[in-house]
Image (cartoon, rainbow, N blue to C red):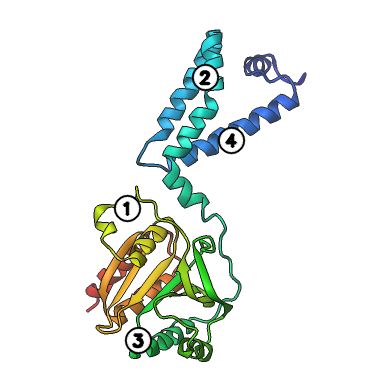
Amino acid sequence: MAWLSPGNYWLFSVLGIFTWNDLFEISVITLGIYYGSRWLATDKRTHLLPAFYGYALLFITSYYLHTHTLTMLAMCSFPIIATIFFLVHQQTLQKNFIALKKSFNEHATSGEWLSSFMRSCLIVINQKNPIFVLFERKDNLDSFVHSKLPVNTTTQQELLDALMASTAYHPQTMIWVTSNGLLKGLNSEWQVELDQTWLSVDIKKLDSWKQHALFITAKTDALLLHIEPTSRQCTIITQGKAVERLRLEQAMTMLNNYVGANIVKGEFFHAQQSQQRAAQRTP
């Protein structure tokens, strides 16, 4: 790096940059620290970022003060510190990485598919059977759900009516469909064990299907619809929250917003409330 001015050369010498290899290595490490810090900053509950900065400051200070024992201790303890950070940060880790595989399905159908789909569900309701529908959006649910009757085809009312009328369909299980109209399967069930430390006392009193729905929707952008056959009241669970005792018309409005709108994860209920306030202001 002979082309550097004396001032810049002194700065690069202090940073230990003498060759292009040094510059490349330091750049990679810097980017790793930067993105790791941003990842830790997403956890608003445990505030791990200041602890990480404190550890880095301790390491740098001990190195420049030539306290070799403390420097070696900080270096050797890094894997342990990193493991502790991962364990403490596990909720955000699960949410961001368990469902890393996104569902980019090209089998998009027109917006009419939802109305046809719900008409088929009403046939099941008229037969005094409950309905459980799991809607998958961008977060892939293959690691959370198993379908005993996989279909993987675009939603068609004639096909749905035939499948739901057959003896192979079990109403107590879930119908698995994507937000763009791909029917992934029937007789779908959860294949994930609940984290008992996450469940509160009130949650433990709920039905198993509701416990799983609250748990999975808290970590993904999925939505679960349940329709009770006797009262025809609907329950919608998404983002770890449940809205109960909805009329069919109210549930359809929320489903249309979920399926058709470009709502950022975590803002579904906020957008829904905004639309309701706007409708109330309309004369």
With 275 as the anchor, is 98 left or right in this view?
A: right
- Tell me the distance, in whole angstroms, between the alpha carbons under discs 2 and 3: 63 Å
Kindly identify the amino acid type of the residue bearing the numbered disc 1: Leu
The local secondary structure at tag 1 comes to: loop
Residue at x 47%, y 23% (from the top left corner) = 55
Q: Earlier in the sequence, mark 2 or mark 1?
A: 2
Q: Which residue is mark 2?
A: 74
**Within 10 Å of the Cα at label 3, are there few (<14), some (14-19), or many (20+) other Cα atoms?**
some
Q: Nearer the viewer, mark 2 or mark 3?
A: 3
Q: Earlier in the sequence, mark 2 or mark 3?
A: 2
**Within 10 Å of the Cα at label 1, are there few (<14), some (14-19), or many (20+) other Cα atoms?**
some
**Within 10 Å of the Cα at label 2, are there few (<14), some (14-19), or many (20+) other Cα atoms?**
some
Q: Which mark is residue 125?
A: 3
Q: Which residue is mark 4?
A: 32
Q: Residue furthest top?
A: 66
Kindly identify the amino acid type of the residue bearing the numbered disc 2: Ala
Query: Where is residue 190 shown, x and y percent of the image?
Result: 45, 65
Q: Nearer the viewer, mark 2 or mark 4?
A: 2
Q: Earlier in the sequence, mark 1 or mark 3?
A: 3
Against 199, residue 154 (above or below) is below
- Tell me the distance, in whole angstroms, between the alpha carbons under discs 2 and 1: 37 Å
Q: Earlier in the sequence, mark 4 or mark 3?
A: 4
- Tell me the distance, in whole angstroms, between the alpha carbons under discs 1 and 3: 31 Å
The local secondary structure at tag 4 comes to: helix
State whether residue 256 appears in this view: no
Image quadrant containing the C terminus = bottom left
Q: Which residue is mark 1?
A: 199
